[in-house]
Amino acid sequence: MGDRRVVVVGGGASGIFAAIRMAEQDPSLAVTVLEKSRDVLQKVGISGGGRCNVTHDCRDPRQLVRHYPRGERELRGMFARFAAQDTIDWFTDRGIALKTEDDGRMFPTTDDSATVIGALVAAAQAAGVDIQTRRVVRGAEREGDGFVVHVGDGSRLESDALLVTTGGMRGGGGRGLVESFGHGVLEPVPSLFTFHVDDPRLNDLQGLAVTDVEVRVVGQKKLVNRGPVLVTHWGLSGPGVLKLSALGARALAETDYSFELQLNWLPEERAETVASAFATQRREHPRKKVLTASPVSLPRRLWDRLVAVAGIPTDRIWTELRKDEARNLVAQITTARFKVHGKSLNKDEFVTCGGVPLKEVDLRRMESRRVPGLHFAGEILDIDGVTGGFNLQAAWTGGWIAGSAMAGRD
């Protein structure tokens, strides 16, 4: 065993990654990971629907930071040290090949999160990290220049430095531990969620995907986003909605998830250009039915529904389309409004904004500004990204920096 001992509370992505980094950099360091669950890396296991969205193919740190609604400014310096390319290299060096999908998300070529988990656990074991599961931490305190960690079975571990990586605080997590050391906590709220919408315009359209939609929260000028939208059994989802939920995490929580949403199904077009397309269709194809001859690029099922909602009879031909019907259809395409009345998690993933305020942490070392030797990484900090591998990237980066600092290699 080494002369110095370090305890990591939490066996998630950032905790395991930090443990590997510090053990590899200083083999004399005795590193112990305490995880309350049966297995480590559980959120890694469900990431990307069980395929593990390891990172995003965004190699420029200056572009990468733009995908974080909270922490963008602070992450600039962190990503200058360890970013997406470093993550790719880390896994590649350990025999894990990654592939890039059309939307930039990166997965192991096996499409199995067990591949990533296996690589991390193997690296930890090879470095001599002591991973202990089913170990609930009840508290920790300063003792001399180090710490004493109290475990649920009544045992206590002495540690020269302490890393807390317990994830989001929605269910308690490491909140008590953080606050016991005098740190504040920004109240956590969900950051990636889908919108509950009960509207006849969406009935029976489950599974319909539109590749580019402008989505905005009515009355919130900054809450607007463009991207793919998916109609689900409970409302609206897809990257366009999920990113908007992250951008507006706190503002939408304050509404108790009851607000109005405006969609432009053709964000490249304005109402005037859509109306002009209708006029051209009326002139060039006057005898064709409005229902079966759409002049705009929309999925057929969606066009059929919008035509019906606009009050246009199924047998109406373009030359007989009334002005009020045309106006209604243009509005349904470019400024459709929907009432949102709740939210759902994004599949099994749960990301929160909130946690330890970044101003209380020296992000060059991921170390508390209040308690020397106390470090943080991962979702316990007020950093969160949009969907697409960005949250795992922040975990790898924070873990790597914390591990480097705790091994004395920062």
Image (tube, rainbow, N blue to C red):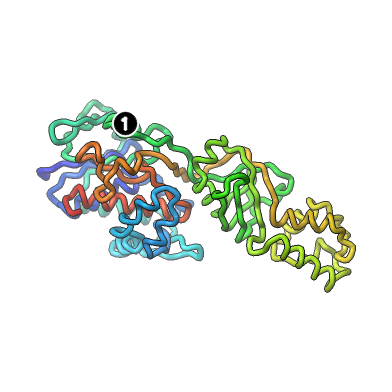
Viewer-side residue, 376 vs 46: 376
Residue extending furthest toward the top: 154
For the point 56% across and 35% down, the residue is 256
How crowded is the residue under tag 1: few (<14 C-alpha within 10 Å), some, or many (20+)?
Answer: few
Q: Name the residue under label 1.
A: 179
Q: In this view, does 306 lie to the left or right of 124?
A: right
Picture coordinates of residue 186 (x, y %)?
Answer: 40, 36
Q: Report the front residue among 292 and 240.
A: 240
Quadrant placement of the N terminus: top left
Residue 67, quarter of the rendered image: bottom left
The percent coordinates of residue 284 (x first, y second) are 83, 73
Q: Could you tell whether 132 is left or right of 306 in the image?
A: left
Q: Which amino acid does label 1 sit on?
A: Glu
Left-right relation of 317 to 6: right
Would residue 110 be visible to someone looking at this image?
Answer: no
Where on the picture, by quarter, is residue 379? top left
Relative to 278, say whether 5 is above or below. Answer: above
- When asked about the image quadrant of residue 78, the answer is bottom left
In-image side of 406 versus 333 (left or right): left
**Position of residue 32 measured from the top left corner of the image (x, y, whole percent):** 22, 42
Q: Point out residue 402 in the picture as x, y percentages from the top left corner.
A: 25, 48
Q: Which residue lies furthest to the left in this view?
A: 3
Q: What residue is rendered at 74% in x and 45% in y?
A: 200
> Secondary structure under badge 1?
helix
Question: Relative to 396, does residue 132 appear above or below in the rendering?
Answer: above
Residue 206 appears in the figure: yes
The residue that appears at 24% across and 29% down in the rendered structure is: 150
- Please tell me which residue lies in front, 347 or 382: 382
Q: Residue at x 26, y 54 (%)?
A: 123
